[in-house]
Image (spheres, helix red, strand yellow):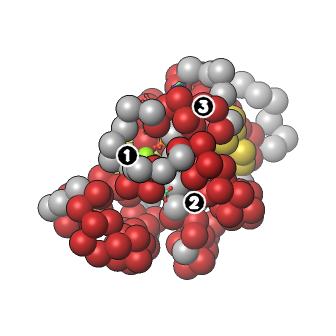
Amino acid sequence: MQALPNIFLIGPMGTGKSTIGRLLAAELRRPFYDSDHEIESRCGCGIPWIFDVEGEGGFRIREADVIDRLTSLDEIVLATGGGAVTNATSRQYLRERGVVVYLSTTLDQQIRRTARDRNRPLLQGTDRRERLRQLMAEREPLYLSTADLVVTTDRRSPRAVVREIKRRVRRLQNPLEQDA
Ligand SMILES: Nc1ncnc2c1ncn2[C@@H]1O[C@H](COP(=O)(O)OP(=O)(O)O)[C@@H](O)[C@H]1O
Ligand SMILES: O=C(O)C1=C[C@@H](OP(=O)(O)O)[C@@H](O)[C@H](O)C1
Ligand SMILES: [Mg+2]
């Protein structure tokens, strides 16, 4: 069976990119990368620290560099951060270097799934619902224009989402084949 291309996951905070990416990579027996984790390990510091010291602009510079490096690899699964698509060059690299899957979810699910997390600076000290709604309004066109596939993660377990991604990516590769 034909090897799957690189698979890049995009979408808003809390949609499940990091969780599902890790599971998908394990099922496909290929390396998994999370751009946030890569940024933190290269910097030796946490994302909140980067936002505090270098601002969102500094974080985006780091993120664009990491996206370029990771999308240059072969046969990987990459979970990007929710704002990676705000960089036009990153969008180009994602589109050119693999299959891009937009994991979509509802605002309620985003709120529920990010409720206990303190590692997302953009959500600290704000009206979380309003902030997430505003980010989605700005970014949804970028998700849609960058993605090859859209897969919802609502009311679906991570494993069910992984099955759906595998099925849809294989169908993208072999449109004439009956679903195995
Ligand atoms: N399909 C899903 N159903 C329910 N909870 C999920 C699902 N996918 C992820 N989660 C949970 O939502 C939270 C955010 O997931 P995460 O992978 O960090 O999202 P992202 O990387 O897109 O911000 C985590 O606690 C994770 O366990
Ligand atoms: O939406 C965003 O701008 C961000 C999303 C985060 O990643 P997740 O989408 O994995 O939470 C992380 O990159 C940073 O906090 C900024
Ligand atoms: Mg993540």
Mark 1, residues whose alpha carbon is within 10 Å: few (<14), some, or many (≥20)? many
Mark 1–mark 3 Cα distance, whole angstroms, equals 24 Å
Q: Name the residue under label 3.
A: 109
Label of residue 170 in the image:
none
Residue 45 location in percent, x, y?
18, 60
Can you say whether 27 is above or below 5 in the image?
A: above
Left or right of 59, for residue 40: left
Dot placed on the residue nearer the N-terminal end, 1 or 3 = 1
| Pointer 1 residue | 32
Q: Which residue is drawn at 45% across and 33% down?
A: 115
Seen at 66% across and 28% down, the residue is 154
Element assignment for label 2:
loop
Residue 150 in sight: yes
Report the quarter where the C terminus lies.
Answer: top right
Q: Position of residue 95 (x, y in %)?
A: 63, 66
State which tag comes first along the sequence, 1 or 2: 1
Q: Is mark 3 on a helix, strand or loop?
A: helix
Q: Name the side, left or right, on which 53 lies relative to 89.
A: left
Q: Visible in this render: residue 42?
A: no
Question: Residue 176: which quarter of the image?
Answer: top right
Label 1 – label 2 distance at C-alpha: 14 Å
Is 84 on the left-hand or right-hand side of 36?
right
For badge 3, the amino acid type reads Gln
Say what amino acid the circle numbered 1 marks.
Answer: Phe
Judge: label 3 CB < 8 Å from ligand 1. yes
| Residues at circles 1 and 3 in contact by the CB criterion of under 8 Å | no
Distance between the alpha carbons at the discs numbered 2 and 3:
27 Å
Q: Earlier in the sequence, mark 2 or mark 3?
A: 2
Residue that mark 2 sits on:
98
